[in-house]
Image (cartoon, rainbow, N blue to C red):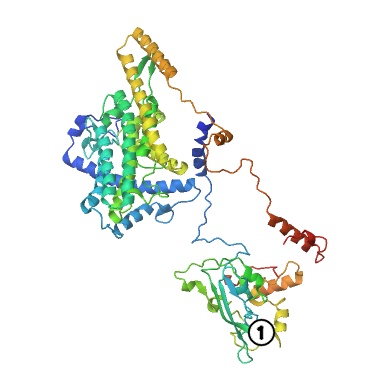
Amino acid sequence: MGTFTGSFKGFGVTFAHMFRKVITTDYPFSPPTPAPRYHGRHILNRHPDGLEKCIGCELCAWACPADAIYVEGADNTDEERYSPGERYAGIYQISYARCIFCGLCIEACPTRSLTMSNEYELARDNRQDLIFTKKELLAPLLPGMEQPPHPMRLGDTDKDYYLGALTNPGTSAGAERAPWATNEAAAASGEAAESDRGGKRNEKTVEGAV
Amino acid sequence: MTDVILAAHAVDPTLQTFENDVWWISLIKLFGVFVLLLLLTLFTIVYERKVVARMAVRPGPNQVGPKGWLQSLTDGVKLPFKEEIIPKTADKVVYFIAPVISATVAFTAFSVIPFGGVVNMFGQQTALQLTDVPVSVLVLLACSSMAVYGVVLAGWASGSTYPLLGGLRSSAQMISYEVAMGLSIVAVFMTAGSMSTSQIVAAQAHGSPVNIFGWEVTTPSWYAVLLLPSFIIYCIAAVGETNRAPFDLPEAESELVGGFHTEYSSFKFALFFLAEYINMITVSAFATTLFLGGWRAPWPITWFWEGANSGYFAVIWFFAKVLLLLFGFIWLRATLPRMRYDQFMRFGWKVLIPVNLVWILFLSYVKIANNELSQQAKWFSIIGIVVVILLVAMLWPAARKPRQISIEEELAARPPGSFPVPPMDLQVPPSPRARRAVAERAAALVGGDSSPVSADKEV
């Protein structure tokens, strides 16, 4: 008798489920907000004066397990300067046909140039469009920023930039904040984030991985 | 002329009512049934999608029209405009005729379904039923048999392997379950004493008194209660007949390409789709008519509302019952996994049909015993039946299971020269490489001081 009644249990299950709240999201109309540290598409950040943070070291490309990143470094000169220091990324490409959004590139980046945003709508209608270049990846110029190439405005050497980034992180605000950071530093970076943040695109998600 | 809507009682049509119909009344009813079936199909598709979705905790279609109820309408408009692809190897004429047969017989079957009693339609007294004949149940069965031609010809004419196999599967399934379905209807004929659908509904209006060993009992009016085994078998067979889950083997989306209509596209596919849903509605309406009292309101309603069955109100009860049965179809689909083909066939031929035959035999005995036998003969016949059943049960060859031999015995029984088999108490010896790894790791732990453990190291 147990197996007989058991074979009708399923009907009770399906019937009872009709009265549950639906679990789907109303996606295209009210898209769900991802978690703050959601691994979305990448951003190449800038210093507060507009210079690129990327130094073309290729560590992200080496870290990438899916071989999705291609970097070619180039030399900065005093006449044509894209980043503080010697080198910048002449070519920077991430193929979202290959990227697995593991975030190892973010961990590898020594200058917090590469961070991930919360943007997840990455469908394109051809493969070529899935390869994002510097044009798509670079953070937009915020007020107070200047389109490179231009000379270093925030100090005489690149060291000034890197030390200053702890309190004035530019577009990668939030990424510099470590769990052991002091309250002042956190407040400062939060302030910088609020004043610098232009749109959703700039929200930084990787924290405390310094 | 009496106003039937105000008259507080239902008027059952007789076969004479249908002969008296004027031609334009028939035309109106014909058009009405046609439009109704199309609308009902559109409704059923969304209904099914919504209910299945709710059972899967999803909202289902919710974009087109109010709450998504126009989804199937837009799909239906889109389908005929899609590209029509006809395989080169297809037999063009048959390929064209097959969906037409399917759709036509599906529509035809509904012509003998009664939606209500006699009503006043534009000043004419007419029944809410397109037509009725003394053997209208057989008309319905004939239509469902003809539907098999649509399936089998579609599979054959496609000139392709998968549709052919799918068509064979479908037709085998439909024919098998038609037998069970036809047999379950026999009990209804016997009880109602008629094969006309309107008369069967009329016969279910009231229970009839029966005398069981001196007690006067009024039988329940609905045949679903009175003839419960028939009703259950009919319901199962109807699901098999319409190729619906859990008996949807012919189209088994996850296993087959799509069954007999694999090579069909555009409007011809739409016809098959339409026929499938109309068939589902037809068997539900048929079950309502034969077993659930047809268009008559269920008991508690007639108890406090005398005029519930009169005039056009009957349509409400009819569709309420049909929608309830359709819900059953959808519920089955949401709950049960697909059956295996051999289990399915065995169930049809070895369970449904024998059970049905025994049930009909029993029923005919009850009929004869009630009407023709004296009290004494009744007792004798019952004793005789019990003795026969006991004898059969005792003499039935018992299915004795062969003794399960153990693996050791099985090994011992192997002839010489058989393939070698691994020992039964097989234990995998530890790999020599595992020990080396342990030794190396131990050396690394002491931080460069490898003198005491390195002797352990194998090279």
Helix, strand or loop status at disc 1? loop
Amino acid under label 1? Pro
Q: Which residue is mark 1?
A: A84
Which residue is painted at 52% across and 41% down in the image? B418
Q: Is residue B147 left or right of residue B327?
A: left
**Residue that lies at the very extreme toward the bottom in this rendered image:** A79
Image x and y of residue B373, in percent: 31, 11
Image x and y of residue A191, in percent: 69, 73
Binning the other alpha carbons within 10 Å of mark 1 as few (below 14), some (14 to 19) or many (20 upward) gives many
User: Foreground: A181 or B69?
Assistant: A181
Residue B316 seen in this snapshot: no
Which residue is painted at 39% across and 55% down in the image? B65
Q: Is residue A178 above or below residue B139?
A: below
Pick the quarter of the image with the C terminus of chain B: bottom right
Pick the quarter of the image with the N terminus of chain B: top left
Q: Is residue A108 above or below residue A90?
A: above
How many numbered dots are placed on residues in this image? 1
Residue B456 seen in this snapshot: yes
- Chain for numbered disc 1: A
Which residue is painted at 27% across and 52% down in the image? B159
**Residue that lies at the very extreme toward the top in this rendered image:** B376
Image x and y of residue A44, in percent: 60, 76
Q: Quadrant of residue A87?
A: bottom right
Q: Is residue B345 left or right of residue B136?
A: right
Q: Quadrant of residue A34?
A: bottom right
Image x and y of residue B344, in percent: 40, 37
Q: Is residue A59 left or right of residue B385?
A: right
Q: Is residue B80 above or below residue A133?
A: above
Q: Is residue A171 left or right of residue A2?
A: right
Which residue is painted at 34% across and 47% down in the image? B166
